[in-house]
Image (cartoon, rainbow, N blue to C red):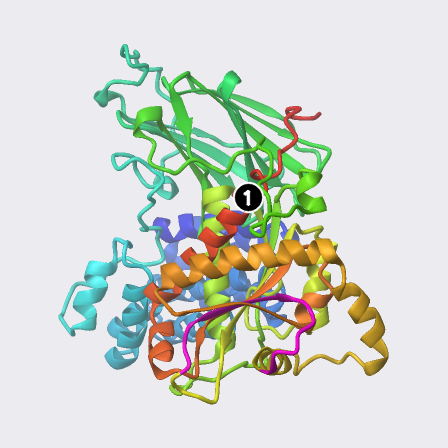
């Protein structure tokens, strides 16, 4: 029961920023219920909290809809266990199912799928329905510690009912000997262990330290130390953008974490660590709407790019001896741009402009399904999955700011997609689609940039992707003038070349080349923009591969490598503000 309470508190901490009154009241009511003797609890006590949460998910676009649904399902499980109320298990299953249907790419999917399968097996006696969720769970999360149990259950083996609704995922950024951060106890920090000549604590000094604080969107910091490395775990109220910077000569690495939606008035803090790798951690709100977290390290120590993990939301930074670092070096931050592939130059390169924010546009969505494959596979779902995977790679490996035009099954008009990028002052716009052709044997990778063309095939592809536009012929003149912006076109062509080569190579698909066409979704973009057709849904072989998580990950990796090559050609990432925390 206390494990469930811990999870509810962690979920709540990540979700409070958008609707603090309702969520905070729900958490307070649940804590009060936990203090009530079990014999005095009534079904109405649990239902009252669920009723408070319900308005938060009635609007499917509300930012806290997923958190509210997941917590409500958890409360139904608690009611079933505490009051031996079997009917509450069915309510929990229905709520988990509603969450998965309403938001298939939710950060809660992992735990919701596993919990739903366990309820269906042990309490609803529906093993066939459970097998569907178990199969998807195993395919999506092969590193999860619960996969072994899920495989046995999927085969129909009888096993004891496992624990669920607790955090049990493998965290690759944490050294193997450290405990999962969500289960760390809140006890006083031990005295610093004596350091060896190498500057790291001896193997016996494995320890954890917890610093409760609330600054911006940060909800706490934990530091895990053992013989092989240190992990700094930054608790977040919810998923927010972050960027990374470093001052190597001063042995500083810093993370600027969005403070959007956070309450005002939080104070700055300095946390003394002294574990042989990390000297201290400083945290301060900045005037730019960011919270800066600065890690002071010892010489000869390297901090990785930082990785975001959901449920509960947290940023994890692994710190190791420089020789043991496994991540590839980040793009340079002060190098002249390379010439264009054709040998020329552009104003973008002459001015030394760099990349700091990328908008990813999963095509179609909502009632606009896009191409439907022979096996009833929808383009809108495939490209959303690939875009989310690509965004995760960009954030984890480069620390760039990633914005999605849509993060769920929502229809966004074509003209609004580039408007989103323009409002965000994005540096690149990448629209992701799956191709179609009357010839079922057509296959391969194509990447488009914006230009006028007489190529009939390219015009046919553009006509299909432009079908939902509501532009009129009166707009033709302004559209052509926009297309004629030469510098943006040159850089878009360069970006398309890099994406096309890497995507085709990594995916192992035929390279159909870079093409130009007047795509409406690209016309309004004020930055280099491309449209990638990642495979042919009309090809039965591609349709089959696009159903697999492994192939979608390869596509995301290919797009990532193409973007990385383009970023390198410009001389690296945009240099962050290195002036330090601002008061």
Q: Is residue 447 magenta?
A: yes
Rendered location of residue 74, percent (x, y)? 42, 62
Against 238, residue 85 (above or below) is below
Rendered location of residue 106, percent (x, y)? 48, 63
Q: Residue at x 16, y 66 (%)?
A: 152
Looking at the rendering, the stretch of residues picked out in magenta corresponds to: 442-456
Name the one closer to the observer, 284 or 353: 353
Q: Which residue is drawn at 43% across and 70% down?
A: 96
Against 85, residue 424 (above or below) is above
* Residue bearing mark 1: 569
Against 296, residue 342 (above or below) is below
Rendered location of residue 474, percent (x, y)? 86, 79
Q: Residue at x 46, y 64 (%)?
A: 386
Which of the 4 image quadrants contains residue 325? top left
For the question of whether residue 303 can be seen, the reply is yes
Rendered location of residue 275, percent (x, y)? 37, 19
Which of the 4 image quadrants contains residue 454? bottom right
As drawn, which residue projects farthest toward the left? 157
For the question of whether residue 46 can be seen, the reply is no
């Amino acid at each position: 029961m206390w494990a469930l309470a811990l999870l509810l508190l962690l979920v709540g901490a990540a979700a409070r920023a958008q609707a603090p009154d309702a969520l905070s009241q729900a958490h307070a009511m649940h804590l009060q219920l936990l203090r009530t003797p079990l014999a005095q609890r009534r079904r109405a006590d649990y239902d009252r909290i669920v009723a408070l949460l319900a308005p938060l998910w009635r609007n499917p676009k509300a930012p806290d809809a997923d958190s509210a649904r997941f917590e409500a399902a958890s409360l139904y499980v608690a009611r079933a266990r505490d009051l031996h109320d079997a009917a509450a298990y069915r309510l929990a299953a229905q709520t988990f199912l509603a969450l998965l249907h309403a938001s298939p790419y939710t950060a809660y999917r992992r735990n919701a799928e596993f919990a739903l399968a366990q309820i269906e097996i042990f309490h609803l006696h529906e093993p066939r329905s459970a097998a569907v969720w178990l199969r998807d769970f195993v395919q999506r999360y092969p590193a999860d510690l619960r996969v072994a149990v899920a495989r046995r259950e999927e085969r129909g083996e009888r096993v004891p009912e496992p624990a669920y609704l607790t955090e049990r995922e493998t965290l690759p950024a944490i050294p193997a000997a450290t405990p999962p951060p969500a289960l760390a106890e809140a006890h006083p920090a031990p005295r610093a262990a004596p350091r060896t000549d190498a500057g790291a604590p001896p193997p016996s000094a494995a320890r954890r330290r917890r610093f409760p604080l609330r600054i911006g969107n940060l909800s706490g910091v934990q530091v895990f130390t053992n013989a092989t490395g240190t992990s700094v775990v930054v608790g977040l109220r919810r998923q927010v953008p972050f960027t990374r910077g470093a001052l190597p000569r001063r042995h500083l690495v810093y993370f600027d974490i969005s403070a959007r939606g956070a309450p005002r008035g939080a104070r700055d803090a300095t946390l003394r660590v002294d574990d042989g790798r990390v000297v201290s951690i400083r945290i301060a709100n900045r005037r730019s709407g960011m919270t800066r977290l600065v890690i002071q390290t010892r010489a000869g120590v390297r901090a990785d790019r930082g990785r975001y993990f959901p449920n509960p939301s947290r940023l994890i930074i692994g710190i190791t001896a420089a020789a043991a670092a496994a991540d590839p070096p980040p793009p340079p931050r002060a190098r002249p741009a390379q010439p264009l592939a054709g040998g020329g130059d552009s104003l973008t390169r002459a001015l030394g402009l760099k990349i700091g924010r990328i908008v990813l546009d999963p095509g179609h969505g909502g009632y606009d399904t896009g191409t439907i494959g022979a096996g009833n596979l929808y383009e809108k779902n495939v490209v959303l999955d690939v875009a989310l995977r690509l965004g995760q790679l960009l954030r984890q490996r480069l620390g760039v700011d990633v914005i999605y035009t849509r993060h769920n099954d929502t229809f966004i008009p074509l003209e609004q997609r580039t408007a989103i990028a323009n409002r965000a002052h994005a540096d690149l716009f990448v629209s992701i689609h799956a191709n179609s052709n009357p010839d079922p044997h057509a296959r391969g990778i194509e990447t488009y940039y914006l230009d006028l063309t007489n190529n009939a095939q390219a015009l046919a592809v553009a006509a299909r992707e432009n079908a939902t536009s509501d532009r009129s012929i009166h707009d033709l003149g302004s559209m052509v003038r926009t297309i004629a912006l030469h510098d943006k076109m040159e850089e878009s062509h360069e970006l398309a070349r890099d994406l096309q080569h890497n995507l085709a190579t990594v995916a192992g698909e035929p390279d159909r080349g870079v093409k130009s066409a007047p795509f409406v979704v690209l016309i309004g973009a004020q930055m280099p923009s491309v449209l990638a057709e990642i495979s042919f849904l009309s090809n039965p072989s591609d349709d089959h591969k696009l159903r697999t998580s492994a192939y979608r990950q390869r596509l995301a990796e290919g797009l990532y490598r193409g973007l990385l090559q383009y970023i390198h050609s410009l001389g690296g990432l945009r240099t962050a503000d290195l002036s330090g925390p601002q008061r």
